[in-house]
Amino acid sequence: MSMVEKPFRSLYATLFSIFILFGTSMTIIGATLPRILSDFSWDYATAGAVIAAGAVGYFMSTFAAGVFVAKFGARAVILAGLALEISGLTFFAATPSAPLNLALNLAIGIGQGFIELTVNWATLRMDKSGTGRAMNLMHGAFAAGAFAGPFAIGLLLGADLPWAYIYRGIAVLFVFVAITVAFLPFTALGEERKQAKIDKKVSLLGHPAYWLGFFALLLYVGVELGVSNWIAEYFVSVFGAAAATGSFMVSLFWGGLLLGRFGFPLFLKDARQGVVLISMSILMTVSVVALAAFSLLEAGPYVIPFAVTVSFLAGLGCSIVYPIVVTFVGGIFPGAQSEAIGFASMGGGIGAFVFPYLMANVSGVWGLGAGFATYAFFSLAVVAACVGLVRAAAKSTKTGSAAT
């Protein structure tokens, strides 16, 4: 069976391209962080605050976007998100002003939240088979963009070109997709089944999967984006690598994500999602623990190649967690999909806000090795949350969906 039915393919393809750009916009700050720190004379705390502002915008907007989609429609919400992305990326890093860049990244984060929720909701509506393959592949687009952005930055740095060009280029590409979105058939996705507001809220709040989805993404996104945002600086400061090499490490991490998100829906069509989710979260945890441990060793001919390999494996382990969690949550609450996945995504946004700030402060006091050890601890909690969600989803399947 096709992942997406023919009437939805143009919509899916356009949302796929949006998610490529969305993925790029989520990782380029981390990839340019070594140059931002040196060119703008920022310390870790300032950089952490600017990065955290984007996360604040993201988690403020994801849950709100779920409500807005139900009220105003998917097209209006995603266009609002694209407008904010275009505005923020056009001017971000144009000056060293920390307050201005913080405000711009806040706007970018709000736009990212609107885009994330709308694309996830639309993909769930297009996946009539309920296998989750369409969602996994869509998030493969995110990984492709997340891989391409830092790779392009590495090329810019290697060619001694201005690194801020990447922000302006993505803004221009977002303009083109925004024009396309205005003509897409969002109405074909239909509406969620109506349910009394009070009954729906009680059903959502009282179901373990509602909270497990929230905490799984809170912890996972914190670890994923934390590693992504700081791995370039980690290689520069711990291993003495060049800034361009650090940027390529971000691409390598997202290359692992890319392989997993495209590979699983294309080659493991009949794999049990719960087994895959738990297995890959364990791989993520082992890899992040290893990265933290490498900071205790002397950089040498063997340590750095192992660290590079583990960076890729960390990305591979991260690859499938987010899309499968969203698929589980959307499947359990078919009558309240936008709100349920909005709440889970808000957890991810909170994690993206809290963890960079935590990382900046821990690293500023005890060094980046201690910061990565903190991520290793929380990656263990991701495994526990995923196990709980799989069990809750299995129980819901036996008794019937929670919010139908």
Image (cartoon, rainbow, N blue to C red):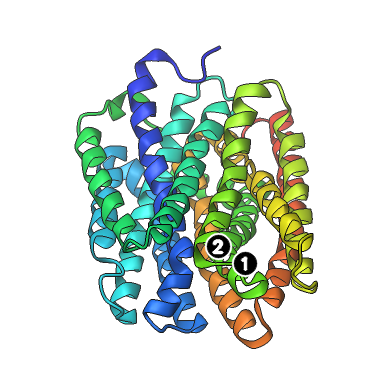
Q: Which label's residue is closer to the chain start, 1 or 2?
A: 1
Q: Amino acid at mark 2?
A: Gly
Where is the N terminus found, in terms of image quarters? top right
Q: Residue lying at the far bottom in this picture: please name it.
A: 365
Q: Nearer the viewer, residue 38 or 91?
A: 38
The residue at 30%/44% (across/down) is 78
* Residue bearing the label numbered 2: 246
Image quadrant where residue 328 sits: top right
Q: Position of residue 62 (x, y in %)?
A: 42, 54
Q: Amino acid at mark 1?
A: Phe
Look at the picture and state if 112 lies above or below 138.
below
Which SS class for mark 2?
helix
Where is the C terminus found, in terms of image quarters? top right
Q: Position of residue 101 (x, y in %)?
A: 32, 73
* Residue bearing the label numbered 1: 235
Look at the picture and state if 224 lies above or below 54.
above
Res 252 visible: yes
Residue 112 is left or right of residue 137, and the answer is: left
Q: Nearer the viewer, residue 250 or 299?
A: 299
Look at the picture and state if 63 lies above or below 401.
below
Look at the picture and state if 79 lies above or below 364.
above
Q: Residues within 10 Å of mark 1 (few under 14, many from 20)?
A: many
Q: Position of residue 263 (x, y in %)?
A: 62, 30
Residue 327 is left or right of residue 342, and the answer is: right
Q: Nearer the viewer, residue 70 or 121?
A: 121
Which SS class for mark 1?
helix
The residue at 55%/62% (across/down) is 246
